[in-house]
Amino acid sequence: MEPMLTVPEGRPGAGGYREHDILIITEDGAEDVTKYPFGIEFNVI
């Protein structure tokens, strides 16, 4: 899963931000192995 936010050039905060989850997919489902917390409170752009 990799949602991305892009702020156009010339605007405050211009650039991009991606938030990642790393998953292990098995026959029984998926396991999220991402240990770092994510969300706007952990990442300031």
Image (tube, rainbow, N blue to C red):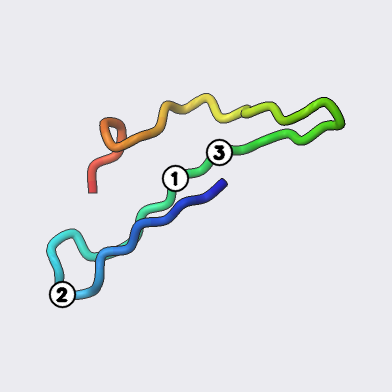
Q: Which numbered tag is attached to residue 21?
A: 3
Return the residue at label 2.
10
Amino acid type for the residue under numbered disc 2: Gly
Image position, residue 24 (x, y; %): 73, 34
| Secondary structure under the numbered disc 2 in the rendered image | loop
Image position, residue 27 (x, y; %): 86, 31
Image position, residue 31 (x, y; %): 69, 27
Label 1 Cα neighbours within 10 Å, binned few <14 / some 14-19 / many ≥20: few
- Circles 3 and 1, Cβ within 8 Å, touching? The answer is yes
Question: Residue placed at 51% from the left, 43% from the top?
Answer: 20
Label 3 Cα neighbours within 10 Å, binned few <14 / some 14-19 / many ≥20: some
Return the residue at label 1.
19
| Secondary structure under the numbered disc 3 in the rendered image | loop
Image position, residue 40 (x, y; %): 29, 37
Amino acid type for the residue under numbered disc 1: Glu
In this rendered view, identify the residue nearer to me: 31 or 28. Answer: 28
Question: Residue pushed farthest front?
Answer: 28
Say whether residue 8 is left or right of residue 19: left
- Circles 2 and 1, Cβ within 8 Å, touching? The answer is no
Label 2 Cα neighbours within 10 Å, binned few <14 / some 14-19 / many ≥20: few
